[in-house]
């Protein structure tokens, strides 16, 4: 998931960004409301995490402006102000969720997963493609009865491919959703991670679940599909 994180406390910003990246997310950072507005208008994001009390433009006003322009991306507001009226103001402006500082990184990650499922209209937390099963909350992968251990980055890549299956996704789309915006798409790291997944997912004597579509990208295709 590509996330825009806006927080004027530099120490907290670095801590949250590091935690989100360690969990396999791509993170764009902003230190004030005006910078966050620019970032939201110039790059695709799957979730926004916005502090309310920011210089130049506060989080509630930013959310209200985004919703007026028809932006539907899930938004979590974070603040040290926990009064009911503050939460109501943020939610009425169009935010989807609200976290009061201090909060744990695990809680933020859980809220983001919940918003992502709601955005996709999922009733189940499990994605199934052929004989492969991904539990998006527990972050557990199985192929048939066989459990598969993945790193956070591998899981994020597999989730993105599985959600798009059987459509082909470009390397550019993978970079935008799984890696940070400053990632150099000219390197071969996407191919490297595709090979990591193939080594863990594929079974001897059977076609790979991840197909290379030359000149386009990669497609996750269930076993047995031509």
Image (cartoon, rainbow, N blue to C red):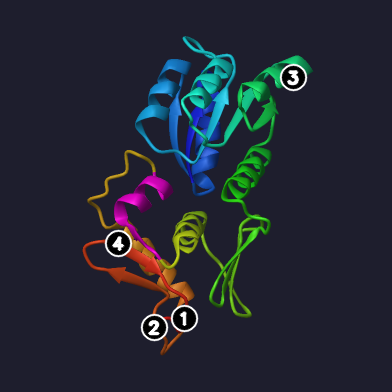
- From this viewpoint, is residue 87 visible? yes
The boundaries of the magenta stretch are 167-179
As measured in the structure, the alpha-carbon distance from the residue carrying label 1 to the one carrying label 4 is 19 Å
Q: Secondary structure at mark 4?
A: strand
| Res 217 label | 4
Looking at the image, is mark 3 or mark 2 earlier in the sequence? 3
As measured in the structure, the alpha-carbon distance from the residue carrying label 1 to the one carrying label 3 is 50 Å
| Res 223 label | 1
Looking at the image, is mark 4 or mark 2 earlier in the sequence? 2
User: Quick check: marks 1 and 2 in contact, CB under 8 Å?
Assistant: yes
Looking at the picture, how far across and down is residue 184, in whole percent? 27, 45
Number of the front mark, 3 or 4: 4
As measured in the structure, the alpha-carbon distance from the residue carrying label 3 to the one carrying label 2 is 54 Å
Number of the front mark, 1 or 3: 1
Residue at figure coordinates x 68%, y 29% from the top left: 99
Looking at the picture, how far across and down is residue 84, in whole percent? 78, 18
- From this viewpoint, is residue 32 visible? no
User: Quick check: marks 1 and 4 in contact, CB under 8 Å?
Assistant: no
User: Quick check: marks 3 and 4 in contact, CB under 8 Å?
Assistant: no
Looking at the image, is mark 1 or mark 2 earlier in the sequence? 2
Q: Secondary structure at mark 2?
A: loop
Q: Is residue 118 magenta?
A: no
Image height of 74 relative to 136, above or below: above
As measured in the structure, the alpha-carbon distance from the residue carrying label 1 to the one carrying label 2 is 7 Å
| Res 207 label | 2
Q: Which residue is mark 3?
A: 82
With 111 as the anchor, is 21 left or right in this view?
Answer: left
């Amino acid at each position: 998931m590509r996330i825009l994180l806006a927080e004027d406390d530099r120490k907290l910003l670095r801590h949250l960004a590091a935690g989100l990246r360690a969990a396999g997310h791509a993170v764009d950072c902003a230190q004030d409301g005006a910078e966050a507005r620019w970032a939201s208008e110039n790059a695709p994001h799957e979730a926004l995490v916005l502090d309310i009390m920011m210089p130049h433009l506060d989080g509630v006003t930013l959310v209200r402006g985004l919703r007026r322009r028809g932006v539907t991306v899930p938004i979590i507001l974070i603040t040290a102000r926990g009064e009911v009226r503050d939460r109501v103001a943020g939610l009425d402006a169009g935010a989807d969720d609200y976290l009061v500082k201090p909060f744990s990184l695990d809680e933020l990650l859980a809220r983001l997963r919940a918003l992502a499922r709601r955005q996709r209209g999922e009733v189940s937390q499990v994605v199934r493609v052929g004989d492969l099963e991904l539990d998006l909350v527990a972050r557990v992968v199985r192929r048939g009865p066989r459990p598969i251990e993945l790193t956070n980055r591998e899981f994020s890549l597999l989730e993105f491919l599985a959600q798009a299956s059987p459509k082909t996704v470009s390397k550019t789309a993978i970079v935008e959703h799984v890696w940070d915006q400053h990632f150099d798409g000219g390197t071969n790291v996407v191919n490297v991670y595709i090979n990591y997944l193939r080594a863990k997912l594929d079974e001897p004597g059977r076609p790979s679940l991840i197909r290379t579509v030359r000149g386009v990208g990669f497609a996750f295709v269930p076993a047995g599909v031509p």
